[in-house]
Amino acid sequence: MTAKMTMAQAINSALRDAMTADESVVVFGEDVGPLGGVFRVTEGLTRDFGEDRCFDTPLAESGIVGMAAGMAMNGMRPVVEMQFDAFAYPAFEQIVSHVAKFGNRTRGTLRLPMVIRIPYAGGIGGVEHHCDSSEAYYAHTAGLTVVAPADNTDAYALLRAAIEWPDPVVYLEPKRHYFSNEEVDLAAADSTIGRAAVVRKGRDATLIAYGPSVPVALAAAEEAATEGRDLGVVDLRSIVPFDDDTVCEQVKHTGRAVVVAEAPGFASVASEIAARVTERCFHYLEAPVRRVTGFDIPYPAPKLEHFHLPDTARILDAVDELQWEEQP
Amino acid sequence: MSVDELGAAVATVRILDEAGDLVDGADRPDSDALLAGYRQLVHGRRLNEQAGALVRQGRLAVYPSSRGQEACQVACVTALSEGDWLFPTYRDAVAIATRGVDPVEVLSMLKGDWHCGYDPAQHRVAPQATPLATQLLHAVGVAHAARLKGEDTVVMALCGDGATSEGDFHEACNFAAVFASPVVFFVQNNKYAISVPLARQSVAPSLASKAVGYGMPGVRVDGNDLGALSTVLGEAVEQARRGGGPTLVEADTYRVEAHTNADDATRYRTTDEVDEWAGRDPLTRVSAYLRGVGALDDDIEAEFAADADRMAARVREGLGVDVAPDPDELFAHVYATPTQQLVQQRAALQGEFDVEEA
Ligand SMILES: Cc1ncc(C[n+]2csc(CCOP(=O)(O)OP(=O)(O)O)c2C)c(N)n1
Ligand SMILES: [Mg+2]
């Protein structure tokens, strides 16, 4: 059964379905109640499920995440919203020191089934603090599961899976796609956390991307096809756990790879991917793995962001440099 | 002390009522000072309106308006001396302009040119803070450094009602109180944090009453009453300057417009409520009073308006000019000396332009 919906609506559906299926699922954060969130992701939840199931908190992210941890300890499944990527930082202490570590600290007796939803990354012309790609901080923190959907079907499926997951999940929502309309098939969605998807098969090189960079990679592959190069695209879906198998299978198949991500490249998730692929596929590689990322700078002001974000031209330039024997 | 006693202990300071009449027992405000303040209110209102128009025309990406809060915006700045510092938030463009910063420079952040459009050191105005309450600690730091250096600087630190829920608010108040820092914490309680009403932030009898827990004075003042604000903030500044430590001042006011142009306030509050507050406008009561004592007439009013129109025209002109963004700037300011990697990245970007031009 398919339906046309935006990513915001797909996420809303996932919250609704999870709240209907499981009484212990509760949603809270800043402006998520009557307003329905600044992106309208929680629209109607307070009205339909009541104030106990979806509510506004005082304005304090550390409080939101810390309280969620306590509620998770006491049998609930909190799904909390950080209003924007950079506004999750006041909660960093809770996330890194406690949410990520309770399970390990208690030899697994205290697992925290909770989800921290974070609208993230740029491309919306937002002012400072509204466009950070903060995935590396979370991915670097052992104990956190980190997922980033790229399309509306996955937005639904991965959130349902995240809510059912036994461990805390950082769920990164590519905010620039909130209002993109797509045909979504909720029933057919793959809700496996930890499995990458080959979203485009290709013979010549593999583009590896996640979140907001997947559509950019797909557009680049489209353009390359017109120039006679057949590029495949892998959508990671899940950054942690990382699906070495799917990624490496594709790279071995094509012998060339480019990683695409809009976060600054230094010490990044893109770097981790390049290193893993190189270690595992070295003898299959025709060229070093390339990274196309944002620059190593704070996210730029709106008028400058287009210089910073990876685009198809930059991806195709990187593909061109993969030591081809013959030009297409 | 019971919660009720605590609430009763912090009354709201007022000088003029909504109609512009002197409230019982209040001292007459100085007419010259009030007239000068009124001129700034007119300017502030005009700047709010002009910025709103620029958003509708697509010249500004976004504007958090301080309409209805202009008395707070003006009074917190006129209470300061030249060597003092102001720590504003995203909503305080009018305060920054009142401090003497060119409004074109103030608004260039919202135009999307750069993260801060003015030189903070020149005017002693920190960059507008977006992460809530974080700037309050910087304010304490500036104040503490001034004390260590033997300077008599006072720091005016602004935040909203919502921001008082953040941990940094608590830490800043506590640090300032412990170090007796010359800081005035000025909370513009405009009743909302985007859609979330004050009742969800705090059930304390008032935000000012929180000061008790830190061991500093707390004062609640009518935030639409310029004279009362000037008195209260002026006293708090002078106390800080004399070495008397910080004060927490809460202004009882209202955000008349939506959070920003991107927000739809009808989703969470009634027009009745908005209308009621619009009837407590900070400008009308001052003009009514000044006219009553013969300090303001139509001619002066017209002069102020013409003056404000000229300012608005300069703002339109200044923001109408599109300066081509310089991509080199992306790399120039991240470190005092760009890293080797940034130098390479700057060259790579330049290389892309060269290819485009070829
Ligand atoms: C740490 C942090 N969390 C969330 C936000 C998003 N945000 C921006 S303004 C705002 C409401 C602030 O309300 P208040 O402090 O009352 O100030 P007002 O906007 O009313 O002036 C929120 C939640 C932010 N800027 N910083
Ligand atoms: Mg407020």
Image: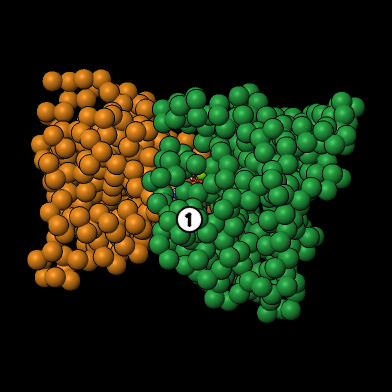
Q: Tag 1: Cα neighbours inside 10 Å, few (<14), some, or many (≥20)?
A: some
Quadrant of the snapshot with the C terminus of chain A: top left
Query: Against A106, is A156 above or below?
Result: above
Query: In the rendered view, would you say A4 is above or below A269?
Result: above
Q: Residue B18 or B191: which is nearer the viewer?
A: B18
User: In the figure, is residue A147 to the left or right of A118?
Assistant: left
- Give the residue pinned by disc 1: B7
Q: Position of residue A296 (x, y in %)?
A: 49, 55
Residue at 41% from the left image edge and 45% from the top image edge: B199
Assess mark 1: CB under 8 A from ligand 2?
A: no
**Measured from the top left, where is residue B303 in percent x and y?**
88, 30
Q: Quadrant of the N terminus of chain A?
A: top left
In the image: residue A77, left or right of residue B211: left
- Image chain in orange: A
Residue lying farthest front?
B24
Horizontal side of residue A24 vs B307, given as left or right: left
Give me the residue at 32% from left, 23% from top: A181
Q: Mark 1 is on which residue type?
A: Gly
Please tell me which residue is depicted at 82% across the width and 33% down the height of the picture.
B292
Can you tell which chain is drawn green? B
Residue A8 occupies quadrant: top left
- Side of A23 relative to B327 (left or right): left
